Image (cartoon, rainbow, N blue to C red):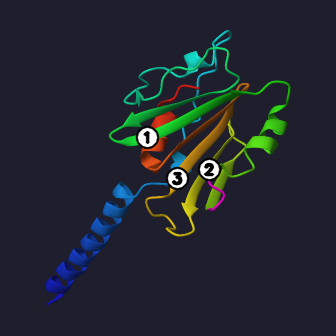
Amino acid sequence: MRGSVLVGILLAASAVFAVFAFWFLFSLTPADQRFNQQRNAVPDGVTLTEMLPDPMGDFARLTPQVAPDAPEVAATYGDNGVRVSISIKPLKGQTQQQEIAYNLTVPHCKKTTDNPSTTSHLDGKVPFVYTQCTSDALMGGSDATYNFTWLDDDYLFSADATDPEVLLRFVNAYPH
């Protein structure tokens, strides 16, 4: 009798451990906690258009190059049908704290009807904000967009996409 009880306890403990192991191995941490802080410095003398390579990792550029003297550049990249838009704006003449106050404390939703959910990480090596924008009507449906905006050197980078995992893969592959 004691042997069968002991076997039952071991089987129950094994099942609990298997459920925990499955959860531990296959649950993802939030995208903002997986943002890569190890970024290369922007080289001196690089133009804004040179900061948007074609291709970039697994992502093919879908938009043509912009004029090299543009004050701000933007491009759209694609991977498996998901588009990622990125914009780069040089920031001159302000301290990093001013840039954080002006650019990283506001949600970066494109539509005014969006409900933003923003997570700020302003104390790291690369200050950034992660925003999830959901429409009132869909609340996280196919109309949801996700945005990473970060400061690196004297530039403001902002990227958005409809898939948070593709966006995370893109911003982590982006060198600056």
At mark 1, the secondary structure is strand
At mark 2, the secondary structure is loop
- Identified at 85% across, 25% down, the residue is 93
Q: Which amino acid type is shown beneath numbered disc 2?
A: Lys
**Mark 3 Cα shell of 10 Å, populated few (<14), some (14-19), many (≥20):** many
Q: Mark 1 and mark 2: span between their CA atoms?
A: 15 Å
- Nearest to the observer: residue 68 or residue 102: 68
- Nearest to the observer: residue 168 or residue 144: 144
Disc marking residue 2: none
81 in magenta? no
Disc 3 versus disc 2: nearer the observer: 2
Q: Residue at label 2? A: 110
Q: Mark 3 and mark 1: span between their CA atoms?
A: 11 Å
Is 124 situated above or below 105?
Answer: above
Query: On the rendered structure, is 78 left or right of 92?
Result: left
> Between disc 1 and disc 2, whose residue precedes?
1
Point out the image quarter for the C terminus: top right
Q: Residue at label 1? A: 83
Query: On the rendered structure, is 111 left or right of 153?
Result: left
Region of the chain picked out in magenta, as a range: 109-113
